[in-house]
Amino acid sequence: MAKNNRTLMQGLIIGIFFGFFLQKGGVTKYDVIVGQLRLIDFTVIKIILTAIVVSMLGISYFYPKDMLPVKTKAGSIKNATIGGLLFGVGFGLLGYCPGTIAGAIGNGYIDAVTGGLIGIVLGTMIYAMIYGKLKEKGVLTQDKYSEYSLFHHMKGSPFKVTIPFGAIIVAVLFIMEMGGL
Amino acid sequence: MDFLVLERWSPYVVGVLIGLLNVVSLLVSKKPLGASTSFMKLGGIIYRSFDKEKVQNNEYYQKNELKLDWGMMLVLGIIIGAFISAMLSGDFNLIAVPSMWANEISGSFLLRFFSAVLGGIFLGVGARWAGGCTSGHGISGTSFLSVISWVAGIAFFIGGIAVAFLIYGM
């Protein structure tokens, strides 16, 4: 019980930081998120790509020391694409993604509560209803990339891969900045 | 501590902080950042209060423990954290129709309400189908160097960009 409560508190505190950072980044706002999808405001992609580089380098340091888990999701390229595109349609129509629905609620966006929260909860219920059918019809297959992470297959230090990859992402960001995006 | 009352921080500063937060989360709680699973659990808990048997017999809900957990607290925390940040900078505003939508589409509350619900439904189905969202796949999974997460993350933006252009034009 005590351990369970500690886990809940950790979730709450990490969430508070996450929400704080999202709001300071401006991505708890419809105009900023949809500005990204209309390719007129590149805040969202700058935040995501920077977060990926830092997180990837942190994982490269701690994973070989066995200090954190690398748990990746099951599924397939096919279903990541289908689900991802469906998600994208919702992303464009609503203007928030799941995490930023919560952030937008904290920022005062009423449409994130009345529309976003209700809609996404309904959406997950619909998925739970059709899950059995999807499975039965053999849609929910897993391919060789299910639960695949490159970290599981690297020999030697992961930095050999992640530093060059991170450098490419930083270069992309640099070019975007130079291009005035 | 003036930076705490600033309305906006550089996206690069925010990106670094969120990246570090993901690492801290993995070190401390052994869990990556992610949000969409919690909405599914919330839905299951609500549904269960109406029809217990149906949820207990549902194959998808059976795979998941429907109780208050780390991820749901994380989502609650996001609401609180965003609220604190907005209050500190005087950036908290009650908005029913976002200004971009109001200026270019319609000021109607109902139209925005229904499109938001529909958008949310697609988001919910899509997130579960793909196995994650912009946080779970887009930040955590990609930095785990998961191919599936990179594909999902790119698909999120392809779908989103297409719909944004359909709604707002070129």
Image: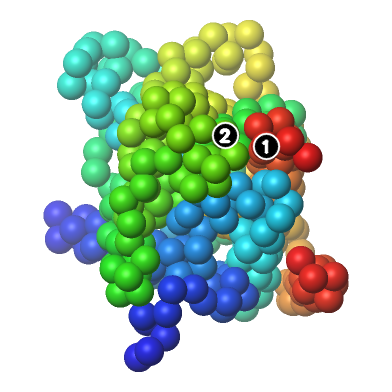
Judge by depth and name the residue closer to the eye, A87 or B116. Answer: B116
Q: Amino acid at mark 2?
A: Ile
Image mark count: 2
Q: Which mark is residue A54?
A: none
Q: Residues within 10 Å of mark 1 (few under 14, many from 20)?
A: few
Q: Amino acid at mark 1?
A: Tyr
Report x, y in % for residue A92.
61, 37
Residue placed under numbered mark 1 in the picture: B168
Q: How is the image coloured?
A: rainbow
Do discs 1 and 2 belong to a common subunit? yes
Judge by depth and name the residue closer to the eye, A40 or A98. Answer: A40
- Most extreme residue toward the bottom, as rendered? B1
Report x, y in % for residue A163.
77, 76
Task: Give the chain letter at badge 2.
Answer: B
Determine the residue positioned at 49% across, 73% down: B8
Q: SS for tag 1?
A: helix
Judge by depth and name the residue closer to the eye, B102 or A20. Answer: B102
Report x, y in % for residue B93.
33, 57
Q: Name above or below for residue A108 compared with residue B169.
A: below
Q: Which mark is residue B105?
A: 2
Image quadrant holding the C terminus of chain A, namely: bottom right
Q: Earlier in the sequence, mark 1 or mark 2?
A: 2
Q: Name above or below for residue B157 compared with residue A77.
A: below
Q: Name above or below for residue A48 compared with residue A89.
A: below
Query: Which quarter of the picture shows residue B49?
Result: top left
Determine the residue positioned at 43% across, 64% down: A23
| Residue B16 in sight from this viewpoint | no
Q: SS for tag 2?
A: loop
